[in-house]
Amino acid sequence: MSLPKLKIVFNYRSPFCALVVEELFALKRLYRVELDWCLVKEVPRPSSLPITQQNPRFPYNRRDCERRARWRGLDWAPPEWRLTDVSAATHLGLWLLRNRPELFEAYTIRVSRAYWSHGANTSEAATVEALAREVGVAEGDIAAAKAATAAIESELAGNAAWCDESGVLGVPFFVVDGEKFWGSDRVGALKRHLNEAGYGSALAAVDDDILFDNSAAVTVPVAGREASVAVNRIFCVGRNYSEHAREMGVDPTREAPFFFMKPLDALVRSGAQVPYPLGTSRYEYEMELVVVLGEAISSPVAPEEASRAIFGYAAGLDMTRRDLQLAARDKGRPWELGKAFESSAVLGPIKPAEDLDSDPAGQIVLHVNGDIKQNARIADMIWSVQEIVSNLSQYYHLRPGDVIFTGTPAGVGPVVVGDQLQGEIADVGKVEAVIVPRLETRAEPAERASASA
Ligand code: MN
């Protein structure tokens, strides 16, 4: 079967070749497409302005750059480079793409990192050549790439037809199935196209050398954006509301918060059908505020410094095998059997912190089959979100994509098959799940059905 070609079209002097190619590789991980590329002639643009003051349609405007860098855990200050300055990385990259494709991705990632960290000025030929050497590009190839500039020039005329759209300012764009995807939403628009055309699930095409490949990213959508967060780790805080501590038979105190974790395969998106798990007869809900980190924290931070690392918030359900958890607790054993198992962490869409006027403090409510079961205020948490992140930073190198379930208020209780859980946190969003039969139980009716058919 021949795959559709996802073509990236570079302007001759596309200043952000490396960054856009990074998007291209991200798409390749999600969709069954072949990658292709071509060059086009330079489009007219106001090159006298710093890149950050260009047309607002320009996808790498200042706000976007700052946000992207922040989410990577980097400080970013706008460079004073002009659009036409940053072409050295592009030339070498394009030559590698054609002649040394095996080195292209490593080179691209290196250039991209240098750009985002401001560790090197990627507008200088000498700088990008040094980066190329670091990933194993030979001196002869660097020389050949330089010499090929003239040949690249001669290619431009034939592709000039791509340049007829105005206002693009030389930014690379994507083409697939004859359709062009321009502008600041080009990645989102392209994803919608590929989804509708059925090109999704590229993960099926895994590397043949990898046995039992488990690298599939678990992603959760960002509310109101064409973006998702790939979740890294799932931390959970034990008792963080006084009344819930009391209902669990424990005196609430302000001794340090304690944590447990869930594996990544615990994570399911809001709306999921959650199978009643194995090994329990007391399966319970815990409605919780979830914090999503968007920055690395590599040394302990004070609560006041924690906010900058918070990407956003979501409503979540910490599903719990209460009988197993309490048995483990009473024997002083770890909580894994009670807490860490498949589909036990339901996560709603992530509300970016920058879309909120203030930290979440309002009502946190859970309905089961329409009846209110939990109803409290985020402001009643024993440990604030900032204190939790601060405490965790004393023990872990926190990473973007780490999420923290911050504990549940009073009112926890059991579910049965068929129960509809609907939670909501003011200003943050909703989370929903329905409890369905155990997987082993569900196989039986299907067999009976096919036997009688
Ligand atoms: Mn919990």
Image (tube, rainbow, N blue to C red):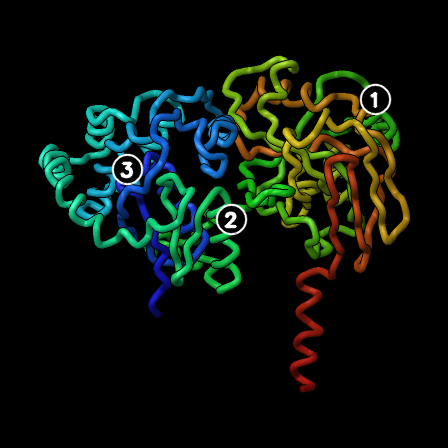
Location of the N terminus (image quadrant): bottom left
Which numbered disc, 1 or 2, marks the residue closer to the eye? 2
State how far apart marks 1 and 2 are (Cα): 46 Å
Q: Alpha-carbon neighbours of circle 1 within 10 Å: few (<14), some, or many (≥20)?
A: some
As helix, strand or loop, the secondary structure at mark 1 comes to loop
The amino acid at mark 1 is Pro
As helix, strand or loop, the secondary structure at mark 3 comes to loop
Q: Give me the disc on residue 13.
A: 3
Q: Alpha-carbon neighbours of circle 2 within 10 Å: few (<14), some, or many (≥20)?
A: some
Q: Are marks 1 and 3 in contact (CB under 8 Å)?
A: no
Give the mark nearest the N terminus, 1 or 3. Answer: 3
**Left-right relation of 248 to 200:** right
> Assess mark 3: CB under 8 A from ligand 1?
no
Q: Which residue is mark 2?
A: 188
The amino acid at mark 2 is Gly
Location of the C terminus (image quadrant): bottom right
**Residue drawn at (74%, 44%) of the image:** 430
Which numbered disc, 3 or 2, marks the residue closer to the eye? 3
